[in-house]
Amino acid sequence: MANNSKTIDKAETLESRYKELEHLLADQQVLNDRSSYQKYAKELADISKIVNTYREYKKVSTELGDWMKMAGEKHDPEFLKSTQQEINALKNRQAELINNLESLILGEDTSLDSDFIIEVRAGTGGLEASIFAADLYRMYTKYIAKNNWQAEILSSHPTELGGFKEIVFAVKGKGAYKHLKFESGVHRVQRVPVTETSGRIHTSTATVALLIEPKEVELQIDSKDLRIDVFRSSGPGGQGVNTADSAVRITHIPTGMVVTCQDERSQLKNKNKAMRVLRARLLENIQSEKTAQLSQNRRAQIGGAERSEKIRTYNFPDRRITDHRINLTLHKFDAILEGDLDGFIDALISKENELNA
C-alpha cells in the first residue's frame, strides 16, 4: 500500500457521505421524488462495500490496540504467547483490509460487473483496416459467446468486402468487463491484404475502446442539449432499411459529440441505441480524470487502456500474436482469432493482481 493515510482519509469521507445519504433516504421530500431517491439509493449502494470494509478495519484496529495494551502488561508467559498470536492475526487482517480498501477506492471493484460497450474502428490501412476491424469484432463475439455472455450490436458502418469502418456493440454478463477491460488500444495487423496483387505484406490498424454503460438515472442528459436528426439509411447494410427515415443522428450540443445509428428499421430503436452510446461516451469523458489517478507503475507496465496505445500485433505470415504490454507472444493464431483469448487475458489479470499486491 502506497499511502495508508490517503486511503483512510478517503474512507472517512465516504463514511460521512454514507451517513448523510441514509438521512436523505429517510427524508419525506426525497421519498416523494422518485428520481432523487433512485440517485441517492444508487450512490449509497455504490459506496456501501467501501464503508463496510472501513468499519471492519476500524473494529480490527481497536481490537489490535486493546491486545497490544495487554501485551505490555505483566502476565504469565503462556498468556503473553497467546496474546502475541492474536496480535499477529489482527495485524494480518488489518493489512488485508487496508489493501482491500485501496483497491475499492481506486475503483478496481466497482465496475467489474458493469454492462459496457465496445467500439471497434478501422484505423490506418483503408479497406484492409476495415476487414481487420471485422476480424476483431468476430474474435470478441466468439469469446463472449464461449463465456455465455451477451453481445448486442448498437451501431455499425459496414464497408465493401465485409469490413467495418466502425462497429459498436453492448456486452452483458458477470465477469465480462473484468476479462475484457484491457482490450482498449491500438491493435496492429501484418498480412497480405486480399486487395494486394503483388503479395506485399501490409501493416494496418484498428482501435478498440471499452466504455462503461451508465443507467439513465446515473447520467441525466438535458433534452435541450440534444439535436436529433433523422434520415434514410444508406451504404452497405442500409439497403434493407432505407425506405423510410429510420436512421438517427444525435448531437450533444455542449460537447459536439455525434452518434449515428441506422441498423434498426425502427426510428425509435435507433434513437434508443444511439442514446446508450452517447451516455457511455459522455461518462467516459467524465471519468477520464479518475482513470488518470491509477498507479503510474501499473500504467507503465500493463497500460492504461488508452485508445492511442499500441497493445497487440497480429502477424499472419509468422502465425503469431504479441501483446506488447506484457511481452507475451502466443502461437495459437487461429484459435485466438476464433475467440480463445484466455492466454492473453489471464496473463493480464495476473499481472494486474501482482502490481496491486
Image (cartoon, rainbow, N blue to C red):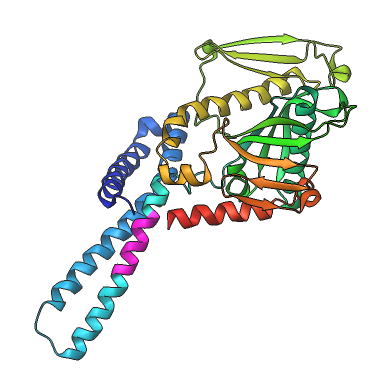
Region of the chain picked out in magenta, as a range = 91-100
Residue 341 or 179: which is nearer the viewer?
A: 341
Q: Is residue 97 magenta?
A: yes
- For the question of whether residue 292 can be seen, the reply is yes
Please tell me which residue is depicted at 69% across the width and 35% down the height of the picture.
188
Give the residue drawn at x 50%, y 24%: 220
Query: Residue 98, position in %: x, y?
Result: 33, 57
Quadrant location of the C terminus in the rendered image? bottom left
Q: Can residue 295 be seen by looking at this rendering?
A: no
Question: Picture coordinates of residue 167 (x, y %)?
Answer: 72, 28
Q: Quadrant of residue 229?
A: top right
Q: Position of residue 116 (x, y in %)?
A: 61, 37
- Is residue 20 left or right of 327 when viewed as pictured? left
Task: Kindly identify the residue that appears in the image at 25 percent across and 49 percent down.
Answer: 5
Residue 232 covered by magenta stretch: no
Q: Residue furthest left?
A: 74
The residue depicted at 46 percent of the width and 27 percent of the height is 286
Query: In the shown orientation, is residue 137 left or right of residue 35?
Result: right
Q: Is residue 284 left or right of residue 77?
A: right
Q: Is residue 299 above or below residue 154?
A: below
How many discs appear? 0
The image shows residue 145 at horizontal and vertical percentages of 76, 48
Screen quadrant of the N terminus: bottom left
Residue 210 placement: quadrant: top right
Q: Nearer the viewer, residue 342 or 111?
A: 342
Most frequent secondary structure within the magenta stretch: helix
Quarter residue 265 falls in: top right
